[in-house]
């Protein structure tokens, strides 16, 4: 399904992959438009680094590349979320200049049929 999604003329997601002898990590970026701010923004859907590559700068490189991709797509900001319990991730994002905003996340499952 992902392969098909990435083969369309204008894929709705950009996936960045860091690799060595195997996949070391990846990040996925989507873009959207905010009526509230009147501007396009990027959504970091996922940033993952394999355990054996953590602490080696892989996440930093992926994060910087996502920022560049979002900026080149005309985004004025980048948004994402991470669970409260993931202290390692929240510290990483704060070191990279991100602010934490309190929000309540709602999910409504829709029937696929």
Image (cartoon, rainbow, N blue to C red):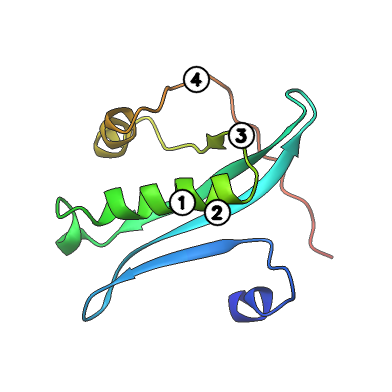
Q: CA distance from mark 4 to mark 1?
A: 20 Å
Label located before the other in sequence (4 or 2) = 2
The residue that disc 3 covers is 76
SS class of the residue under badge 4? loop
60 displayed left or right of 14:
left
The residue that disc 4 covers is 101
Q: CA distance from mark 3 to mark 2?
A: 14 Å
97 displayed left or right of 91:
right
Location of residue 72 with respect to 108 vertically, above or below: below
Q: CA distance from mark 1 to mark 3?
A: 13 Å
Mark 1 neighbour density, 10 Å: few (under 14) some (14–19) many (20 or more): many
The residue that disc 2 covers is 29
Nearer mark to the viewer, of 4 and 1: 1
Label located before the other in sequence (3 or 2) = 2
Q: Any mark on residue 66, and which?
A: 1
Whether pointer 1 and pointer 2 mark residues with C-beta atoms closer than 8 Å, the reply is: yes
State which quadrant residue 92 falls in.
top left
**Where residue 74 appears, x then y in whole percent?**
65, 44
Nearer mark to the viewer, of 3 and 2: 3
**Where residue 104 appears, x then y in whole percent?**
58, 24
Q: As rendered, which of 108 and 52 lies closer to the eye?
A: 52
Q: Residue at x 60, y 74 (%)?
A: 2
């Amino acid at each position: 399904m992902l392969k098909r999604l990435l083969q369309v003329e204008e894929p709705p997601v950009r996936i960045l992959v860091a690799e060595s002898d195997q996949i070391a990590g990846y990040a996925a970026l989507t873009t959207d438009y905010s009526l509230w701010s009147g501007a396009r923004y990027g959504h970091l859907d996922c940033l993952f680094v394999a355990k054996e590559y953590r602490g080696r700068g892989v996440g930093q490189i992926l994060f910087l590349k996502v920022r560049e991709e979002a900026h080149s797509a005309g985004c004025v900001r980048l948004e994402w979320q991470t669970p409260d319990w993931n202290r390692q991730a929240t510290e990483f994002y704060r070191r990279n200049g991100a602010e934490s905003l309190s929000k309540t996340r709602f999910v409504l499952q829709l029937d696929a049929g």
